[in-house]
Amino acid sequence: MSALPPHGEGAAGDRAIQQALDAAWPADLNAVDERQLLTAGRTLLRADATGAARDRWPTYFARQETLAPAFATARFRIQAAIARQDGAPGRAVVHLVWAGTDRGGTHTDGRITDLHFTRTTPTHKEEEPAWIPQPGT
């Protein structure tokens, strides 16, 4: 496994973090599911951290409507991400490493967030299964 970059390395260290994640947790989802989960996970984390597009996830943010976003969108960056199975068929976790500057001006990288998803079953033949984020407890 490659060595992790020191904190504060900036975007230059993101590739090493991604390589470390990939080496630590080999892929176990098909490519389509992995892409869908990574896209959803990145979008959901950005919405959670910055407040941008929270309206796309009304069920997930139902209890958090009054919370102000903690991080500035301009200084928010996802450093690395992987999507893997989460112990049972139809369950997955998106593991994200990210950086951000909070409202007080403190920038921190190497923040870790795990977002859990369950797969829906289509109710009509023409529908595709979808991955639904599970609110944290």
Image: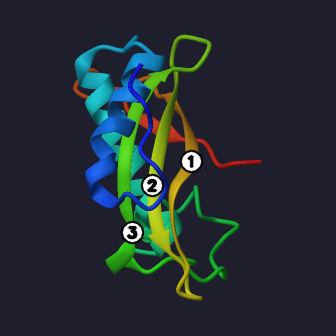
Q: Decide: marks 2, 1 in contact (CB < 8 A)?
A: yes
| Residue drawn at (33%, 28%) of the image | 19
Upstream in sequence: badge 3 or badge 2: 3
Q: Residues within 10 Å of mark 3 (few under 14, many from 20)?
A: some
Q: Position of residue 18 (x, y in %)?
A: 34, 35
- Which residue is denoted by mark 2 in the rendering? 98
| Residue drawn at (53%, 86%) of the image | 105
Left or right: 126 as drawn, with respect to 100: left
Q: Position of residue 43 (x, y in %)?
A: 36, 55
Q: Secondary structure at mark 1?
A: strand
Q: Residues within 10 Å of mark 2 (few under 14, many from 20)?
A: many
- Which residue is denoted by mark 3 in the rendering? 76
**From the viewer's perspective, is residue 68 above or below residue 88?**
below
Q: Nearer the viewer, residue 34 or 119?
A: 34
- Which residue is denoted by mark 1 in the rendering? 112
| Residue drawn at (37%, 42%) of the image | 80
Query: Which amino acid, mark 1?
Result: Ile
Q: CA distance from mark 2 to mark 1?
A: 6 Å
Query: Which amino acid, mark 3?
Result: Phe
Q: Decide: marks 3, 2 in contact (CB < 8 A)?
A: yes
Q: Decide: marks 3, 1 in contact (CB < 8 A)?
A: no
Q: Residues within 10 Å of mark 1 (few under 14, many from 20)?
A: some
